Image (cartoon, grey):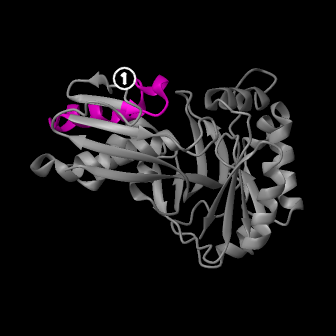
Amino acid sequence: MSAKVRVGCKVNLFLAITGVREDGYHELETLFYPVPEPHDVLEFAPGEAAKAGPDGREPARVAEGFALWCSEAGLETSSNIVAKAYEAFAARTGFRPELTALLTKGIPHGAGLGGGSADAAAMLAWLNAGAGGKALSPEELSALAAKLGADVPFFLMNRPAWATGIGERLAPADVDFSGMTMLVAVPSERVNTAWAYKAWDTAHFHASGERMRTQGVNKLAAIPLCPRGINRLLLRGRLFANSFEQVVFKAYPRVRMLKERLLNLGAAAACMSGSGSSVFALFEEHALAAKAASGIKQQGVLVYFSSI
């Protein structure tokens, strides 16, 4: 069945790197929050492959049974996470429908917003809904999603969630910003996630060269559901923190200045998302958020609003 899906993104209300495992993966404590803007659009055309995308280009055959058109032509490859999601689901279940996906990108790359992971989750959810007797249980689908990326399972859940491990262990979180306005600001700088982790490692090596294991800094880590009243803690800045800010702000001072600018313009709270470069801010008044957006747009920053 054809479908057109609006795919939102996420911000990390809190992110702490708590250590490095023996296999090199970093352990995290993070609080994911789904955000409707910016967004991608993913359109599914099952059956006979679509003859052309919106711009007239023919979709690229990137897997057996699967063709992909993207508004950014360079993403039409088998390494695209949407193509990987299709292939992983087909290999796991044997359900391999003839399908074309049309992906219109609106979520910036290298901004820490999880656009690729969100697209992959949308692909998995669509396939699972149409797989009939081959469909996976929610637990099986989440496990498959985690193999594609640590935050893909979160986008299947699509509600505020506390994540630990490498980001794959999820518990729903009671976070409600109703009536507030979230502004997501994306500067021209783009931050490579692999670089950010390497920079963090370098900053936390012992003199001996041994990787340091940090102590968890989030006092709510042992609480499976964030307690009511957490909003007050967040808005007082007690949880708005991101381990990546230390290294990213040093290498990309304009990102640091963007956060400072948002706070100076009246944001109740602001923080970098993921490994950057986006900075999100919460405003108690929409008019104040609009005024702030007007100010930073003049600096060549992309700005997105979400009334939540």
Q: Pick out the residue farthest to the front.
A: 56
Q: Is residue 276 above or below residue 291?
A: above
Q: Pick whichever, 210 or 39, lies toward us.
A: 39
Q: Pick whichever, 242 or 224, lies toward us.
A: 242
Residue drawn at point x = 57 percent, y = 62 percent: 222
Q: Is residue 283 above or below residue 191?
A: below
Q: Looking at the image, can residue 275 be seen?
A: yes
Q: Secondary structure at mark 1?
A: loop
| Position of residue 54 measured from the top left corner of the image (x, y, whole percent) | 39, 37
Q: Looking at the image, can residue 237 be seen?
A: no
User: In the drawing, does residue 75 fall left or right of residue 209?
Assistant: left
Residue drawn at point x = 62 percent, y = 27 percent: 194
| Position of residue 221 measured from the top left corner of the image (x, y, whole percent) | 60, 59
Q: Give the residue type that dot 1 points to.
A: Ser
Q: Quadrant of residue 61?
A: top left
User: In the drawing, does residue 99 fall left or right of residue 117?
Assistant: left
Q: Which residues are magenta?
A: 69-98
Residue drawn at point x = 21 percent, y = 32 percent: 49
| Position of residue 72 measured from the top left corner of the image (x, y, whole percent) | 49, 30
Q: Quadrant of the C terminus?
A: bottom right
Q: Pick out the residue farthest to the left.
A: 133
Q: Is residue 56 magenta?
A: no
Which residue in the protein does label 1 denote? 78
Q: Is residue 70 magenta?
A: yes
| Position of residue 28 measured from the top left corner of the image (x, y, whole percent) | 59, 45
Q: Quadrant of residue 70?
A: top left
Residue drawn at point x = 30 percent, y = 52 percent: 139
